[in-house]
Amino acid sequence: MLRVSARAAFLLAVSAVLALGVNAVSPHGIPLRPMTHPTDRPPRNHGALTDGYITLEMVKEASQFGLATLVDGRTAKEYEEGHIPGAINIPVRDFLKGRPPQLDRLDPKGVIIVYCEDPNCGTSVIVAEQLRLYGLRSKHGFEPDNVRVFTGGYPEWQKVGLEVAYGK
């Protein structure tokens, strides 16, 4: 009985090692670590944005001077009804269909700032996570540390009366 248990444990260990190896090299592997950054979500208790958080001023400069690529993770309809000028729409649903064609418009070495509907909207975090995964799976992908989330989202942009773009 002990010998059967030892064989079963050995087979289980070999299977686990093989599965982890295949997962590591597969382009569709499951990430074994979280692909989010601590600054992807707003600070607790509505605290002040500190080091690492993308602020409204940063997004404003990125939009005006092309310092980063802005990605709107909301639906196409929401995007058409108003978005930050210069933003590219990549709805989270587009990732369910495979590699979104809009990724070709992003600079793989540049900073990418993702936003959505409000600070509690998880869409921007999911889109950022997907972009980081593409970065890990491809030598021509996005630098995971260059993909950031603007937690204030589109409402913060509107609230201060900044210019809004409409349509596709």
Image: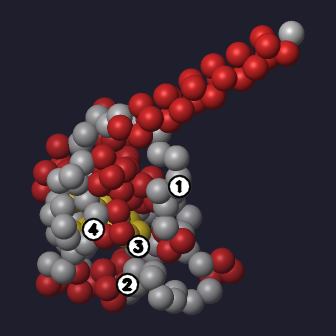
- The kind of secondary structure element at disc 2 is helix
Observer-side mark, 1 or 2, equals: 1
C-beta proximity under 8 Å, tags 4 and 3: no
Q: CA distance from mark 4 to mark 3?
A: 10 Å
In the rendered image, residue 86, in percent from the top left (x then y), is placed at 17, 69
Which disc number belongs to residue 34?
1
- The kind of secondary structure element at disc 4 is strand
Q: Earlier in the sequence, mark 2 or mark 4?
A: 2
Which disc number belongs to residue 1?
none
Q: Earlier in the sequence, mark 3 or mark 1?
A: 1
Q: Report the coloring of the rendering.
A: secondary structure
Observer-side mark, 1 or 4, equals: 1
Which disc number belongs to residue 112?
4
Q: Earlier in the sequence, mark 2 or mark 3?
A: 2
Q: Earlier in the sequence, mark 1 or mark 4?
A: 1
Observer-side mark, 2 or 4, equals: 4
Q: CA distance from mark 1 to mark 2?
A: 26 Å
Disc 3: CA contacts within 10 A as few (<14), some (14-19) or many (>=20): many
Q: CA distance from mark 1 to mark 4?
A: 19 Å
- The kind of secondary structure element at disc 1 is loop
Against 159, residue 166 (above or below) is above
Which disc number belongs to residue 56?
2
Disc 2: CA contacts within 10 A as few (<14), some (14-19) or many (>=20): some
In the rendered image, residue 80, in percent from the top left (x then y), is placed at 25, 55
C-beta proximity under 8 Å, tags 2 and 3: yes
Q: Earlier in the sequence, mark 1 or mark 2?
A: 1
Q: Residue at label 3?
A: 150
In the rendered image, residue 123, in percent from the top left (x then y), is placed at 45, 54
